[in-house]
Amino acid sequence: MSDKVIEYFYSAHSAYAYLGAKELARISQATGWRIVHRPFDFHPVINAAGATGFKKRSAAHIDYFFGRELSRWAQWRDLPILDFRPTFHDNPLALANGMIIAASDPDRISFAILQAHWRDDADIADPDTLLALATACSENGPELIEAALSDSVQRQHDANTQEAIDRNVFGSPAYFIRGDMFYGQDRLEMVARAIAQPFAP
């Protein structure tokens, strides 16, 4: 892996990936470090990490972490966000993640998918929805859908998922700078610092 890359592990339905996406892009542009997208299948990763499933968390935790925190960070990042859990949040991720892997401009299509899910309550497992997003991002929609479902792209999706597990990623998003992991978009200030000046071991 080249030294000047930000390895970006996340899922296409992640609220905090959405909230951090523009700041991540800003850091990339300011530093010249390239973002390497590693979209993964969310549930195998959090299960491997031993995280508590959504349905087992307390109402207070859900109200805070997926309510008040989302609202505050959306205001801080100046991004619109739903005030409810997206209708299609539990739908499969393979197609949306695959489109990001296969896209000619993954930065653009990734943000479009995340935004559609968290701003517009879109079903990002629906091919027609993703076709429209791809076209809006100047991608060849039908070709991108076909590529996203191809064996090679889905093998890469599986490899990203396994790599996230092997590297002890325990949620979305996570960023690696020179192998050092920073979990959560609220660590992006530290990501920028790590690019300029690595943290001591």
Image (cartoon, helix red, strand yellow):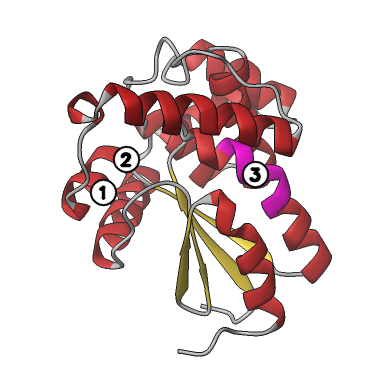
Q: Secondary structure at mark 1?
A: helix
Q: Main secondary structure of the magenta part?
A: helix
Q: CA distance from mark 2 to mark 3?
A: 18 Å
Image side of residue 83 versus residue 76, left or right: left
Q: Position of residue 2 (x, y in %)?
A: 58, 79
* Image quarter in which the C terminus is found: bottom left
What is the crowding at mark 1: few (fewer than 14 residues within 10 Å), some, or many (at least 20)?
A: many
Q: Is residue 92 visible?
A: no
Q: Position of residue 192 (x, y in %)?
A: 69, 68
Amino acid of disc 2:
Phe
- Where, by quadrant of the figure, is residue 6 drawn? bottom right
Image side of residue 88 versus residue 198, left or right: left
Q: Residue at x 40, y 45 (%)?
A: 153
- Earlier along the polypeptide chain: callout 3 or callout 1? 3
Q: CA distance from mark 3 to mark 1?
A: 20 Å
Residue ranking furthest to the front: 60
Question: Which residue in the structure is indicated by mark 3?
Answer: 21
* Residue 42: mark: 2
Amino acid of disc 1:
Val
Q: What segment is highlighted magenta in the picture?
A: 18-24
Query: In this picture, is 109 found above or below 50?
Result: above
